[in-house]
């Protein structure tokens, strides 16, 4: 992959101006160019929601699954071809409501995939209903009297369920988000990145201004190997108190590397060429 233009399809994005999906798309493309992710070594899977359009605009082989099901589709792809870099783009509604069970069980199985959670705390595509990460009291068409449900904490859920790389990014900070995506992909095991993104149209509470005023980066003193500390840190949320960065990281064998059929060949990223060489030697 030589430049960003090679990663863009002729489809023009239909996201609302200022939508956080643009930042995630930009960060992913930057990471893809840096790492050489393309059709020969990478597959993208998206669920249903505004986020799902990302696969229409990115020129890498992709699948847009059923609502809430991108994670099981991605785990199947990874098992079928464990050399592929497999990315899941999903939303807070998609993978914490409809696909909540898939999210939990993929975390505990430690599949070697990267899940990028577009977290805007609203159902944008269906014009603005309350989602599992919407704050208490949040007023939408589905909760005109204010949301009565306590929000799910995606980081705490992922850590508790057994995920081995858990991070939070912000769509307005593309350089840091690019690095997080690269590190998540390098991790051997499931990587969850909760990406805070404004829905300009349907969530006026979580605006760019709100995130810019209240987010901060975890510093070098923070130890992501400490699971108890990571869990405590994941509960931190408030004015000037929204941490970004890698909350938790653990070295553990991935699901795919434990499968006896796959143990015969080592897990090497970007190794499609090696397979072709073997085939050429055998048949030419
Ligand atoms: Fe983005 Fe919200 Fe518009 Fe959907 S409705 S494109 S999430 S700003």
Image (spheres, rainbow, N blue to C red):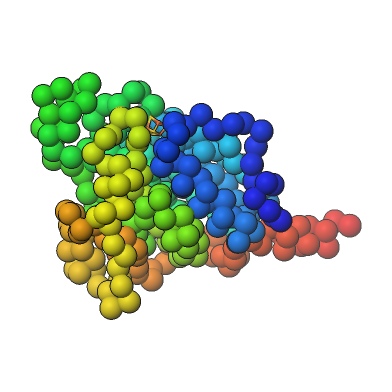
> Is 196 on the left-hand or right-hand side of 271?
left
Describe residue 112's horizontal placement relative to residue 2 as left or right: left
| Residue 188 in the image, given as x and y percentages of width and height | 46, 64
Residue 172, how many percent across, how many down?
A: 40, 51
- Percent of width and height locating residue 15: 47, 32
Horizontal relation, residue 44 to residue 166: left or right: right
Q: Determine the residue positioned at 50% across, 52% down.
A: 27
**How far from the left and from the top, in percent, is residue 97?**
28, 35
Quadrant of the image occupied by residue 283: bottom right
Ligand 1 is located in which of the four quadrants? top left
Quarter of the C terminus within the rendering: bottom right
Above or below residue 51? Residue 174 is below
Looking at this view, name the residue that lies furthest to the right.
284
Q: Residue furthest bottom?
A: 221
- 213 or 182, which lies in front? 213
Can you tell which quarter of the image residue 254 is in? bottom left
Q: Residue at x 27, y 42 (%)?
A: 206
């Amino acid at each position: 992959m030589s430049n960003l233009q090679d990663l863009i399809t002729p489809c023009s994005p239909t996201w609302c101006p200022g939508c956080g999906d643009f930042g995630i798309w930009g960060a992913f493309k930057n990471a893809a160019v840096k790492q050489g992710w393309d059709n020969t070594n990478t597959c993208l899977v998206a669920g249903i929601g505004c986020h799902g359009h990302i696969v229409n605009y990115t020129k890498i082989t992709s699948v847009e699954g059923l609502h809430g099901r991108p994670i099981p589709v991605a785990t199947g792809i990874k098992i079928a071809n464990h050399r592929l870099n497999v990315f899941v783009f999903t939303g807070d509604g998609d993978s914490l409501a409809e696909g909540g069970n898939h999210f939990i069980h993929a975390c505990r199985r430690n599949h070697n995939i990267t899940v990028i959670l577009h977290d805007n705390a609203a159902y944008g595509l269906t014009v603005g209903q309350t989602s599992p990460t919407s704050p208490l009291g949040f007023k939408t068409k589905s909760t005109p009297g204010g949301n009565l449900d306590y929000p799910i904490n995606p980081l705490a859920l992922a850590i508790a369920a057994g995920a081995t790389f858990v991070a939070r990014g912000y769509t307005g900070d593309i350089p840091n988000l690019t690095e997080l995506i690269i590190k998540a992909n390098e991790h051997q095991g499931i990587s969850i990145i909760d990406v805070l993104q404004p829905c300009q149209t349907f969530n006026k509470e979580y605006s760019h201004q709100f995130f810019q005023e209240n987010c901060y980066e975890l510093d070098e003193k923070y130890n992501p190997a400490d699971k108890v500390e990571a869990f405590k840190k994941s509960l931190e949320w408030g004015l000037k108190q929204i941490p970004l960065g890698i909350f938790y990281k653990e070295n553990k064998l991935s699901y795919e590397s434990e499968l006896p059929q796959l143990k015969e060949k080592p897990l090497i990223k970007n190794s499609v060429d090696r397979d072709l060489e073997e085939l050429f030697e055998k048949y030419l």
